[in-house]
Structure formats: structure tokens, C-alpha cells
Image: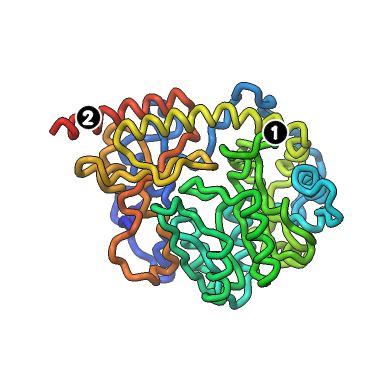
Amino acid sequence: MPPEFPDVSDESPQHHIAAFRQVPRTGVIYVTTEATRLGFSPRNTDWCNLGQGQPETGEIPGAPKRVHHVEIDVDDQEYAPVAGLWELREAIATLYNRLYRKGKKSQYGPENVAVSGGGRAALTRAAAALGHINLGHFLPDYTAYEELLDIFKAFTPIPILLEGDRGYAFTPEDLRREILGRGLSGLLLSNPCNPTGKVVQGDELDKWVGIARELDCALLVDEFYSHYIWNSPPGRLPVESAARYVDDVNRDPIVIFDGLTKNWRYPGWRTTWTIGPKTVIDAVASAGSFLDGGGSKPIQRAAIPLLAEAHVVQETNAIQEVFRAKRDRLLSGLQRLGVRVDRVPDGTFYVWGNVSQLPAPLNDGMGFFRAALEKKVIVVPGEFFDVNPGKRRASRGSRFRQYVRFSFGPSMETMDTALKRLEELVAPLLRG
């Protein structure tokens, strides 16, 4: 893992306080910190941030008008309940029932939902509520899982390697074998996967949920990119969730995380939720009482209209049009540069690129990142996604050292400028 650096706002020598450990930065924070040293800021339009983990947040064609003002009720000056406003929890449950559970006897209710102040807060609550179990996680996967899986000592994280030459496939048979062979009581995953873009959906996801139910293995499913699906069945809203395949909302061991961050394009609102059996929701709310105390009451109230089905359908269809075009543009541009893709992304707004065929030093993720910074382009080296909590696995070099994650979260204009600069970076080296 790359070395850590002091805050860029203070270049003076840092005095180490013995009581505190050095906490590593996640991939996005690391790369933006390094870029800031060279003059990057979010308001500096001369930079192209293909490392960003958020979608463009402004108006896009076909989407509902963006919210620019939030009224604060006099009662909203008080704390929100730790589990979230009941009205918002009710709106979330209703949306999931309408999107995924029509005709099913078992329906989600407000008691199946807990609201929290950001995705990491939701995941941290769940991790704090886990018992002394073996918890599986995939490689590669979301960078923030690394510290999350290390900080709580009740459970043991078990890595499961996915292979690029198999398109990062993991069949229901693979799932059954891993649960039984490694004694897993839980499995944490992002679906769609950040960074590879792999999506487990349809009959395959139905079988995953069935195996989890049969073997009593909790699936902790990070669905923050679940409205960025690029291969959804025709005629169906391009969204997917494990909630579609749950039989009994209070018995099936399926716990889902989502929020306004990506799928509604409101990352700054820091409003997210956990959906699952009532006993799990009670546990994560109890964890929230000592971890974070709950989210913002005014923002939670303002979020309620955004959960209306018509709003979600309109926003999702707009995302499909705008982000699909950006996906296609970024894919073709990177492939022209010589970046290989193990799997064309089924979901998310990322391309997971293999740079091993590029000339040195660009054939290494960190080398590519450093060289791109000189062109004012930010990307994320692949080694950050080699989740290794507590550095328990020996450091022999990451299997993803020759990978880079490229984001098509920014605008098309920003992306086109970035591709042009990367071409200027690669072309002279190819000519030799």
C-alpha cells in the first residue's frame, strides 16, 4: 500500500502522538490528497477527476429538477431518532415494496428500515452489530471495506479471490462451496461491484438469496449503484436488488444498504439506509446509538418526496440515458489507448482497466496515476481495491497492481478532456 502523508494544509514535520495509530486513507481520499499537492481543488475546472466516487450532481436531461433549498421545521431543530424519521423509513419501505415486492405476501415496513448519515455509517453500524463469525468478502471490492473489516474484532474477515480471466464470475455453486468450506456466517459485497462493474442479478441473484436462506448465511449487500445497471432485461426499470428475491422480510438473512448518494445523485445529503429483518434493524440502530447518534433531521424530512416512485423512475431513466453514453465513450477511449478491460461493466459508473500492455511507467497502476497527475487527470490505482484488513496477508505486491479504476461519474465534457490528455501522455511513449 502507498505510504501515508500528512495533511496537505500543513507541510511542517508531524509529531506522532503515541496514543493514536496511523489511520490509512481510502483510495479516493489518497489520490485527491496527492492531487491537491499539485493544485487540485473541486472548484478548479482545469482538473479532470476520473477518480471521483460520486456521480455528477447537477441537472441532466430528463431528470427531475434538483433540490436547491431545504426548509427547516421548528421541530427539526431537535435530534432525529437514531433509526431515522418514521415517515422516511415508511417511504423507503413503500418504495422497495413497489419496485421489488409486488404480489408478495411478505412486505417491508418502517420497522425493517434504519436511516443513517452516510453509507460508511450504515456499514459501520452493521459491522458493529456482527457476532463472532467468519465474514467473507471479495477481492477486489470497495476500498473502504478494508478498515471497516479490521476495526471490529468480533468477526474474522475471510477473503475470496475473484479472477479477471473469468470475468470476476462467482456462481451460486461457488457461493455454496465457500459458505460451507470456510464456515461463513456472513458475506459482505457490493452489487453492482465497485470497482469491476460486475452485477449479480435475475435468476443468479435469486439463487444466491436462496442459498443464504438455506444455509443461514447473512448476505450484507451494498447496493449503492443498483440504479446504474447496463444490461437489465428489456421492458423493466434498470434497477436490481436482493429485496426482489426475499421470501420473508423478517426471516431471510438479507441485509441491504443504499441511499441518496449515488442512485439519487445527492452525495452531499449523507442520507442512507439499511433494510433487513426487524431484529437486524434493532441491532444496527442500537449500534448507531453509540457510534453516530443518527443523521440530520431536516435532510431526512426533505428526502421523503425523493422516495416517491414516479420521482425514482424518472431519475433512473435519466441516469440510464446520460451515464450509458458516458460509459460507452470512456470504454472506447480507454481501449484506443491500449487499456484492456476484463469485463465490460454491467453496472456502476466505473471502468476497471488493465494497464499492463502500456509502456512503462504507465503499465503499473501507481505509475499511471503519478503520470496522469502531471496532466491534471486523477485516477485510482487498482491496488487500493485489494482489500486486506489488518494487513494479515503477506505483502508480496498486489494482484491488482496493474489495474486502474476510471470513473465516468464526471460530466461528458470533463471525461473527453481527460481522454485527450491521457492520449497525449501515452502517444509519445508508444512512439518510443
Using the rendered image of the protein, determine whether residue 286 is visible from the camera's viewpoint.
no
**Residue 404, placed above or below residue 5:** above
Q: Percent position (x, y) of residue 204? A: 62, 54
Q: Quadrant of residue 24?
A: bottom left
Q: Residue furthest left?
A: 432
Q: Percent position (x, y) of residue 114? A: 73, 56
- Looking at the image, residue 348 sits to the left or right of residue 51; the answer is right
**Residue 318, placed above or below residue 52:** above
**Residue 48, placed above or below residue 227:** above
Amino acid tagged 2: Ala
- Residue carrying label 1: 235
Q: Which mark is residue 111?
A: none
Q: Percent position (x, y) of residue 70? A: 72, 33
Name the residue: 41% across, 44% down: 352
Label pair 2/1, CB-CB below 8 angstroms: no
Amino acid tagged 1: Gly
- Residue carrying label 2: 427
Foreground: 125 or 222?
222
Q: Percent position (x, y) of residue 277? A: 76, 63
- Asked which secondary structure carries label 1, the reply is loop
- Asked which secondary structure carries label 2, the reply is helix
Q: Residues within 10 Å of mark 2 (few under 14, many from 20)?
A: few
Please count the marks in the image: 2
Foreground: 251 or 63?
251
**Residue 283, placed above or below residue 296:** below
- Looking at the image, residue 221 sits to the left or right of residue 167; the answer is right
Q: Quadrant of residue 245?
A: bottom right
- Looking at the image, residue 90 sits to the left or right of residue 348; the answer is right
Quarter occupied by the N terminus:
bottom left
Using the rendered image of the protein, determine whether residue 90 is visible from the camera's viewpoint.
yes
Q: Earlier in the sequence, mark 2 or mark 1?
A: 1
